[in-house]
Amino acid sequence: MTAKVKTIERKGGTFLEQLYLVEVVKGMVVTFGHFFRNLMDNSLLYVRHYPEVKPEITPRWRGRHRLTKREDGTMKCVACFMCQTNCPSNCIMIEAGERTDGVTEKMPVKFNIDLLECIYCGYCVEACPLDAIRMDTGIFSVTSYTRESMMIGLDDLLDTPPGFTEDEYKKGGC
Amino acid sequence: MSALDILLIVVRIAFGAFVPLCFVAVLVWMERRGAGFFQDRSGPNRCHVMGFRAAGLIQNIADAVKLIFKEDIVPGHIKHKFYFILAPTLVFITAILSFAVVPFADTLILGENSYVMQAIPTDVGILWFLAVVGFGVYGIILAGWSSHNKYGVLGGLRAAAQVISYEIPMGLALVSLLAVYSTVNLSEMAQIQGQLLFGFIPMWGVVLQPLGVVIFIVAAFAETNRTPFDLAEGESEIVAGFHVEYSSMKFALFFMGEYVAMFVSSALIVTLYFGSYQIPWFSTEALVNNIKPVALLLIVAMPVAAYYFTLWMKKNNRSHYDRPDDPRVREAKVYAAVLWSLVAILEVIMIGFLIFSVGESGSRILVALLQMGCFLFKTFLMCFVYVWVRWTLPRFRYDQLQKLGWQKLLPLALLNIFITSAVVVSLG
């Protein structure tokens, strides 16, 4: 079998191109076109005015985590430690306790996620057998002034509303 | 020395010292916003004082404050602290000094006295410029060497090799220019460029020396270490090059020196090749003799220009998203008010000038002001070309740079000298 050889035509060898100047002027005309267009009307810039105008996030985006609830309002999590075991960056810290609402036997008493450690890989979501943890909040900008506030607890995770409808989320491939 | 003499000395030195410094702010702004617009971005436009962003100029103040309050570090491994601190000052001082011989208006004749409008009214002109600019590279070499850092030394070496190789084509391009003008005095060169060639083309250097202007501009780009010849600070290879060990105001001096050098070399390109302060087709004498129509034209032109500028500003100075009581629209209204009041003040002055007709001296001062404006405008455009080229062309490879300098520009410059001298001799 002979190797496929593709000969690529070398450009830039003609006299006019060797002069540089002609090509330089051509390039400068192109860039000036952009400059002039934007100078005359700066609404044509390809820019999103970010903090005020947010980008659209797809349902598949792995945003900040949340804990889901059953239809009766009790939490789905049964503190099976699957997510914590599976987490490659060890950012989930669960403390299990006895379940008091009578649904099953076990529930988390503490469910802390260190967002500074988290690498947003989504393994916790994949590992969860009960679909109790999801990353569908659509929160992509996780910032804070203190380290302590980057550690979110059970209440925060339960209270965060989903960023998308159930249909959109399912369509995203989960 | 009369009071007038002293006043004019102060005015000229102030112009020579403060205009380059003011242009640093303008150029940094132009570089950033220009880069943005060339790449379909917006550039820095958020910094503001009480909601006034001045089109992004406030960003410069923020940067200056940052640089001033940064810690000024002299790294512990540096043995020659004196040279380490001398280097940035050398770069900055030579850049400012080289502007001192550039004339910014025609020789001002007030009564019996005449004043050459340069910061240093000397005859050496272009020689002074070459000497001082050539000295500036010592600062860069010194910075690289005294940093005691491999990147620094490499950056300094590259800068030195580059400046030396491009000084030769630059000097040779100037030789043919000197053959045409037969003077080294920049003021006289500017006066020669006020004449007309064949009665209808302004006799600018670019018309007399079309090849020379290309060589000179390319060499000037290399001299100021600007893209496409900015190998002295090749980010990917040698980090920041010669100023890698510098911080705070010492870095700021390098930074400002670079922009002052860019301003000065644009000013020199304008002086040598683009008619200096001369307004095309209107020589100084013609303007002085017809000062009333000129003043009348200005009275009409100023409001028209202000009107279109306000339209443009109101169209562009607004937020491009829903915002209650848009502060940018309010900002534009304030700018418009300031602009129109400025125009009104100028109109009153011009009308007063027309009615009371201040005489020969008054009209000469008005013409000098017009020429200063023309000079600054041309220089501004030339600086824009610098920015424009920077955001268009990629960097040359080092061997390509030297090849271009020695194998292309040098023979071309020599050829240019032969052609020019042949023409000059044959025309007598």
Image (cartoon, coloured by chain):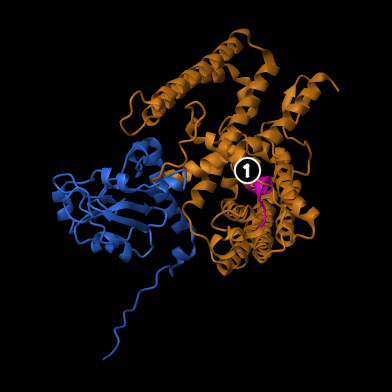
Chain colours: A blue, B orange
Task: Give coordinates of residue B360: x percent, y percent.
Answer: 69, 17
The part of the image, by quadrant, that contains residue B148 is: bottom right
Q: Residue at x 52, y 14 (%)?
A: B344
Task: Give coordinates of residue B353: x percent, y percent.
Answer: 61, 12
Question: Is B328 located above or below residue B408 in the figure?
Answer: above
Q: Main secondary structure of the magenta part?
A: helix
Query: Residue B251 magenta-drawn?
Result: yes
The part of the image, by quadrant, that contains residue B114 is: top right
Identify the magenta region.
B245-257
Provide the residue designation for mark 1.
B67
Question: Is B303 located above or below residue A8 in the figure?
Answer: above
The part of the image, by quadrant, that contains residue A120 is: bottom left
Amino acid identity at mark 1: Leu
Give SS at disc 1.
helix
Query: Residue B270 magenta-drawn?
Result: no
Question: Looking at this view, is A125 or A6 the one in front?
Answer: A125
